[in-house]
Image (cartoon, helix red, strand yellow):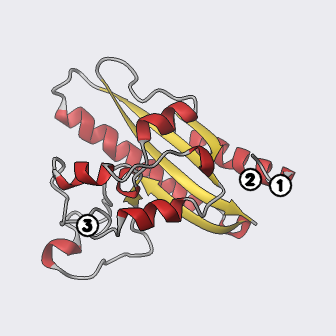
Amino acid sequence: MVKKIADTDILENLVKKALELGADHAAAIPVSKIETDASFRSLCEQNTCGRYGKCWTCPPDVGDIDTLMKTIRTFDYAVVYQTIGTLEDSYDIEGMEEAAKKHNLLVRRMVEAVNEDSFVRILHLGAGGCNICPVCARVENHPCRFPEKAISSLEAHGINVSRLAAACGMKYINGQNTVTYFGAVLCSPM
């Protein structure tokens, strides 16, 4: 539930901003509607993306899953946005990479666009691990080069993205030969 009229305006403006910056869909929901599940960490541990232990914003370095899920609950709202990329076929790796670049650019633009003066706290989450550096400093066991810009993922925080999509009135799968990415701004307005 939206606490006050000012919150509604702030959230509507964030949704509008996400759409203006290139999101295909965006919606605001109370954080209480976001489902989390610690079992998503085991998916990360399978390391299908190759980033487990090689990126500061990915498991295991992003933090304890239970702590991250509790942190999510400390926010009031989430503005969730998605981008949908079109692929030539299900083997179009270049198309998937291009769609991921487009989505990650949107995440960066959202970080820049959010007026922090309207919030007590903000947490930006994207799809997959941070991609600011071509190779994360974690690979060489150096500290993060840009901790103030680093973005972790919805999944690393235990968020069930398919259920998140449904809670926001969005589709998780958007048809054959598409790839869909999600991002979110978790916030607590002043």
Which corner quadrant holds the C terminus?
A: bottom right
Q: Is residue 93 visible?
A: yes
Element class at badge 2: helix
| Chain-order first, disc 1 or disc 3 | 1
Do we see residue 22 in this rendering?
no
Which residue is identified by label 2? 10
- In three-dimensional space, the C-alpha distance between marks 1 and 2, rounded to whole angstroms, equals 6 Å
Horizontal side of 189 relative to 41 (left or right) equals right
Q: How many marks?
A: 3
The answer to whether the residues at label 1 and label 3 have Cβ atoms under 8 Å apart is no
Q: Residue 88, relative to residue 19: is it above or below?
A: above
Q: Is residue 86 above or below residue 12?
A: above
Label 1 SS? helix
Left/right placement of residue 95 relative to residue 159 reads left
Amino acid identity at mark 1: Ala
Q: Residue at x 27, y 63 (%)?
A: 59
Whether label 1 touches label 2, CB < 8 Å: yes
For the point 33% across and 38% down, the residue is 99
Tag 3: amino acid: Pro
Q: Is residue 60 left or right of residue 16?
A: left
Q: Which residue is mark 3?
A: 60
Residue farthest to the top, as pictured: 176
Kindly identify the amino acid type of the residue bearing the numbered disc 2. Answer: Ile
Q: Which residue is mark 1?
A: 6
Residue 98: quarter of image? top left
Which comes before the other along the chain, label 2 or label 3? Answer: 2
